[in-house]
Image (cartoon, grey):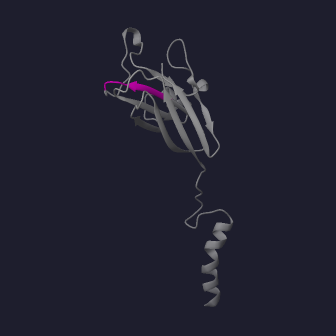
């Protein structure tokens, strides 16, 4: 009986010592606190729609992003802090001035509302390539700046 008690007491300690959760082989991935700073808004009407994607496929699709955020624009800028797991990401943002949840466009698909991408990537026609917008989170804190145009 004494041996059984010792085994039950040592099990949690041994599990922690080898880096495993007592509930199984689950480990918690490291995370980064990311401060996103978006500037270039002409006014504070509407909201900033931010899409954070974690793959080229997600970046190129119109599907659901890894994380979507609606941000209030204060003093013509947005400052938002979020927590993300380490990894590769890209950010797309646009100024939804009329709260219709879409980037309004003119003839030939030219945007009416301001928009931007991580790394302030730009392209002559259409959105920039994923490789130009991607960044890697691999430290406990990181700041990302984007200017909408």
Magenta region's main secondary structure? strand
> Which residue is outermost to the right?
18
In x, y percent, where is residue 3?
Answer: 65, 87
Image height check: is 27 above or below 94? below
Which image quadrant is residue 142 in? top right
> Which residue is outermost to the top?
107
- Residue 10 vs residue 45: left or right? right
> Which residue is outermost to the front?
75
Quadrant location, the N terminus:
bottom right
Image height check: is 100 above or below 137? above
Residue at coordinates 65% horizontally, 42% vertically from top-left?
Answer: 138
Residue at coordinates 51% horizontally, 33% vertically from top-left?
Answer: 37
- Residue 15 vs residue 47: left or right? right
Residue at coordinates 64% horizontally, 68% vertically from top-left?
Answer: 15
Residue nearer the viewer, 4 or 49: 49
In x, y percent, where is residue 58?
Answer: 50, 32
Which image quadrant is residue 72 in? top left
What is the tally of numbered marks visible in this picture? 0
Q: Is residue 94 magenta?
A: yes
Which image quadrant is residue 85 in? top right
- Write the start and end of the magenta stretch as one range: 92-98
Residue at coordinates 55% horizontally, 18% vertically from top-left?
Answer: 122
Q: Is residue 95 magenta?
A: yes
Residue nearer the viewer, 126 or 3: 126
């Amino acid at each position: 009986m004494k041996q059984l008690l010792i085994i039950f007491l040592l099990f949690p300690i041994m599990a922690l010592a080898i880096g495993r959760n007592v509930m199984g082989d689950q480990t918690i991935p490291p995370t980064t606190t990311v401060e996103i700073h978006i500037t270039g808004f002409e006014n504070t009407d509407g909201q900033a729609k931010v899409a954070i994607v974690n793959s080229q496929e997600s970046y190129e699709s119109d599907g659901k992003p890894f994380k979507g955020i609606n941000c209030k624009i204060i003093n013509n800028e947005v400052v938002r802090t979020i927590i993300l797991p380490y990894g590769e990401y890209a950010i797309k943002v646009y100024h939804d001035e009329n709260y219709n949840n879409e980037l309004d466009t003119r003839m030939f698909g030219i945007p009416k509302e301001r928009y931007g991408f991580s790394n302030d990537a730009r392209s002559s026609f259409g959105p920039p390539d994923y490789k130009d917008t991607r960044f890697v989170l691999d430290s406990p804190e990181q700041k990302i700046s984007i200017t909408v145009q």
